[in-house]
Image (tube, grey):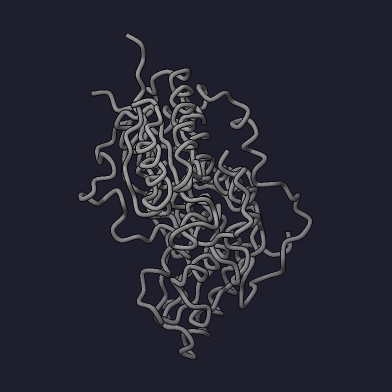
Amino acid sequence: MAISFKQIEDKLKTEAKGLLETGKVSLVLAYGKGYDEKHPMPYVARRPSDADNIVFNEFCTHNMARYMVRYPAGTKMAVAVKAADSRAVIQLIQEEKVKREDLVLLGIPAYGMKNPKTGETIDSKTTCGLYNPVLYDVLLGEEVHGQPVVSPYDVLAQYEAMDKEARFAFWKKELDKCIRCYACRKACPMCYCDPCFIDQNKPKWGEKSPESAGNLMYHLTRFHHLAGRCIDCGECSRACPVNIPLYLFHKKVAKDCEDMFGQAAGMSVEDKPVLVNFRVDDSDKILE
Amino acid sequence: MSFEPKILGIACNWCTYTGADLAGTTRLQYPQNLRVVRVMCSSRINPSFIFRAFQLGADGVLVGGCHPGDCHYNTGNLYARRRLAVTKKILEFSGMEPGRFRVEWISASEGNKFAEVVTEFTKQIKNLGPQTQFKISQ
């Protein structure tokens, strides 16, 4: 491997310090120490001296694009972005939640990120499988080359091949585990609605207690709200305390959107999200 | 007793609902299983309406809108087409029979088509039987 996590950490510290000292940005969204090495935490550096607290290792999986929308519009900020995170930033720019000129993107080309819960390497099975950020201002390290390019949708084949009863049973079993902690919503960079549809009482879209019907309503609607917007970072499934493979459904919807509308989420700042866009020559076949 | 399905119809005010009116005034016969809700445009339909309808016991959902290009608001049904296509894929991947949800473009002058679609769709739902997967057991 070309560059180690330690080197990335050092570069991140230097960049953050420089940006904060010159006043180019008022905060840097990066990673900080957690209660042990396996559990780093999202960290916001506001003063140049804070930059020393920044860490980066193979367990820094969080999507820091999540935290951009928490600050008032016009806040100048620097964000540490990995591959999928940069797509989230692009998607948020498309949705006019943040402005490109307010952001300094510190791109991290990373290979071999690990899931802190299982210790497995994160690859195209649970995420979009990219190694290099799509959009960045500063690249910390060199682009990763020579890693196998696998379609992120390969993992879906076995679920698509299931017959519908088996698939319903599979999802029922998985979604029934949900305890409605909303960690998926909190971890998701695209879930910024306030209030979320499920928190509304009038109209009451679904039951709020953790039982089958409400869980199904919450998750199906959430999959729908993320259609054509989910950038496949896999953070929802990693945040889930009961290990529901939410990434599978998100991947499936992303795949369908790509097939039907010919555009993947968060790949170019010029694109418009597919569901707030249309083409007159969209085929009626998509409804069959 | 034979199975009489409950079908939710969501019809756009300008085309499908007027088409249903025409079917009525021309005294066309079609099954009474359809309960029609009028919305101002097919793009008014929140996908949650459809999930919720299935949960509250609908055996099928039929959405009607203007033909693409004919929308009263010019572009409403073009957005709806994309959105409802995604809804359909989601229902399909969650394990529901794809035949329970259908989108049809029916214009105000197509009373015949409205009656035909409803007859055919009701027959299809009768063949599929009661919808139990999403239904909340009382």
Q: Is residue A268 above or below residue B100?
A: below
Q: Nearer the viewer, residue B58 or A217?
A: B58
Q: Is residue A111 above or below residue A115?
A: below
Where does the image place residue B39, in percent across and percent down from the top left?
Answer: 34, 50
The residue lying at 57 percent from left, 68 percent from top is A9
Where does the image place residue A171, in percent across and percent down from the top left?
Answer: 46, 31
Where does the image place residue A21, in percent across and percent down from the top left?
Answer: 47, 88
Left or right, A244 with reference to A182: right
Say which quarter of the image contains residue A207.
Answer: top left
Q: Nearer the viewer, residue A46 or A52?
A: A46
The residue lying at 65 percent from left, 73 percent from top is A139
Q: Nearer the viewer, residue B131 or B66?
A: B66
Which residue lies most toward the right here?
Answer: A146
Where does the image place residue A128, in percent across and percent down from the top left?
Answer: 61, 52
Q: Please say whether residue A15 is visible from this viewpoint.
A: yes
Q: Please say whether residue A7 is visible from this viewpoint.
A: no
Q: Is residue A217 above or below residue A130?
A: above
Quadrant placement of the N terminus of chain B: top left
Count of marks, rendered view: 0
Which residue lies most toward the front here?
Answer: B26
Left or right, B28 with reference to A119: left
Left or right, B90 with reference to A284: left
Which residue lies most toward the bottom here?
Answer: A22
The residue lying at 52 percent from left, 54 percent from top is A230
The residue lying at 48 percent from left, 31 percent from top is B116
Quadrant placement of the C terminus of chain B: top left
